[in-house]
Amino acid sequence: MTAPARVGPDGWDVADAVVEDETLTPFGRRLPGLVVAGCEPGLEVLERMLREAGMGAVAAPASSAAAIGALAAGRVHAAVVHGPAPAAFAEPAGVQVDRFRMARWQVGLAAPSDVEPGWWQGALSGEVPVVQREQGAGVQRAFENAVVPDGESVAGPRVASHLEAARRAVLLGMPAVTIEPAALAVGASFHPLETHEAQMWVVRDWLGHRSVTEALHVISSSGFQRRLEGVGGYDLTDCGARAA
């Protein structure tokens, strides 16, 4: 029996192997690869490029808080976190990490492209429901900080990623907490609230491992950066450089 292709966010993805007569036959040999968690849509590009190079790779979507938790628990090689000042974030207890810059982008609210001017004011004043993220997500903190004094937002659906939030904004016709690249990817309007920097935190003990070395090489490459630039909304200055 041939294993079915996985349905990914961009269409049909390729299978890694087939099962015939209860025997697994892989399509080529993959080297051990990177496991990274975080809330940066570009991690899917990183995973795909590593797989194209014959490396194994798993990019798990997670909020910054959940990604740091996975790093502390030893479940990942690296975590991508973001915020207005990620240098101030405390490292996970008992784990030494090296930090590498990935990108800067705007955090804010998305809405359908034909939305009325000033639409975001109702989202911040609690007049309309808003598609939101879980506690611990950097975009959620930015939104809650921007809600008018003494105001309270009206929660709509809770979603697990920037891209899903932007899609819900378009499909449901309500504002959503997300980032500018995700809004641009689905053709949504966008209102900025904060500028965030995304960093990849790598467990220091893994820095010499080939999977991590290759991943850092990929994010520093023009091929990776051109793919993100094609989406729009990314400032890739010093992408792949070590953060102070």
Image: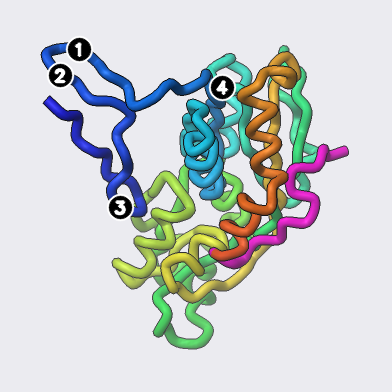
Q: Nearer the viewer, residue 82 or 103?
A: 103
10 Å crowding of disc 3: few (<14), some (14-19), many (20+): few
Q: Residue at x 59, y 67 (%)?
A: 232
Q: Residue 183 location, x and y as percent?
A: 49, 66
The residue that label 4 is drawn on is 76
Q: Residue at x 11, y 25 (%)?
A: 1
- The mark that comes first in sequence, 4 or 2, is 2
The residue that label 1 is drawn on is 23
**Disc 1 element:** strand
Q: From mark 3 to mark 4, how far is it between C-alphas? A: 27 Å
* Residue type for callout 3: Gly
**Disc 3 element:** strand
Q: Which residues are magenta?
A: 231-244
Q: Marks 3 and 4: CB-CB under 8 Å?
A: no
* Residue type for callout 4: Val
Asked whether the viewer can see residue 149, the reply is: no
